[in-house]
Image (tube, coloured by chain):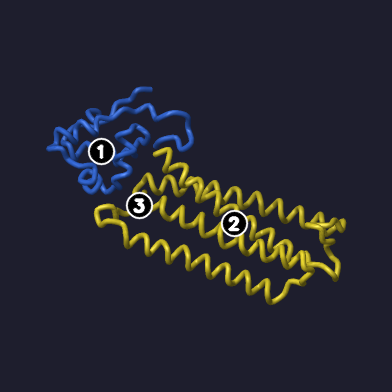
Chain colours: A yellow, B blue
Amino acid sequence: MTRGETRAWIGLVATLAIWSVYGVLIARGLAAGEEPGRWTVALFVEGVILSLAAQFGLTAVVAARIPVAERAPADERDRLIDGYAVRLGYGLLIATVVVVAVASSMAIGIGLPVGGYRLMSSETWSPVAIMANGLLLAVVLAEAVRCVTVLVLYRRAL
Amino acid sequence: MAPLLGKGPPPIRNRIRELRFHAGEMTQADLATRIGMTRQTIVAMEQGKYSPSLEAAFRIAAVFGVPITEVFQWEG
C-alpha cells in the first residue's frame, strides 16, 4: 500500500468515526431538547482535536513502519491522484455549502421545521447552530469523498 | 498524462519490464529510485495502467540508454 493510500485510509476512517460520534451526540441532544451552548462547542473542539491527532498521529506511526526502500517521496502519479481527489472534494464542498446555505435561509425565512424542530423559535436550536452543523456535515462529506477518490484511483492503478 | 477516470488503459505500450530484464534484471525499486518515482508507479506503468509525463519518459529512456521510442510506443 502506498503512502497516499495509507493516508487516505486514515483520513477516511478517522473522519467518519469521529464525526459520526459527534453527529450521534448532537442528535441525542436535539432529541432531548437541549439548547446548543458550551457542550456543543466543546464537542466540536474535541472532534477537531481528535481528528487532527488521529490523522497526524496515525500517519506518523504508519510512516515509521514503512520499510526504508518504500519511503520514496510522492511522485507525479501521487500528485495527479491527490490533485484530482482534492478538486472533486472541493467541488462537492462548494456545492453542498451552497445547498446548506440556501436550504437553511429558505427554511428560516418561511419557518419550515428542520429535523423536526421549528427554526427561529426560542425553544429550539438557533438557525446559526443548525447551519453551522450543516456546514460541518458538508466538510465531512467532502473529506470522505476526497479520501475515497484517492483510494479508488490507486486501486485503478491510474 | 493518463485520463484520470477515462475508460480503458492509455493507448501507449511500453517495454519497461523487458528493458529492465536486459539491464541486468534491474529491480522496479532500482528503476524507481533512479528516476525519482515510487515503485508503485513503475508497477502501474508496466501494467499499462499509467502513462508517465514526458519528462519521466525521457528519464526512463536515459536510464536504459535508448531512445524514448524504444521504450514507449503509441497504439492509438
Q: Which residue is mark 2?
A: A140
In this rendering, the count of numbered labels is: 3
Q: Residue at x 15, y 37 (%)?
A: B25
For the N terminus of chain B, the quadrant is top left
- Say which label, 3 or 2, has the lower sequence index: 3
Q: Position of residue A135 (x, y in %)?
A: 66, 59
Q: Nearer the viewer, residue A115 or B61?
A: A115
The answer to whether marks 2 and 1 sit on the same chain is no
Callout 3: SS: loop
Question: Label 3 neighbourhood size at 10 Å, few (<14), some (14-19), many (20+)?
Answer: some
Q: Contact, CB < 8 Å: mark 3 with mark 1?
A: no
Q: Which residue is mark 1?
A: B58
Q: Which is more foreground, mark 3 or mark 2?
A: 2
Chain identifier of the residue bearing label 1 in the image? B
For the C terminus of chain B, the quadrant is top left
Q: Position of residue B18 (x, y in %)?
A: 20, 30
Q: Residue at x 58, y 52 (%)?
A: A142
Q: Is residue B39 above or below residue A73?
A: above
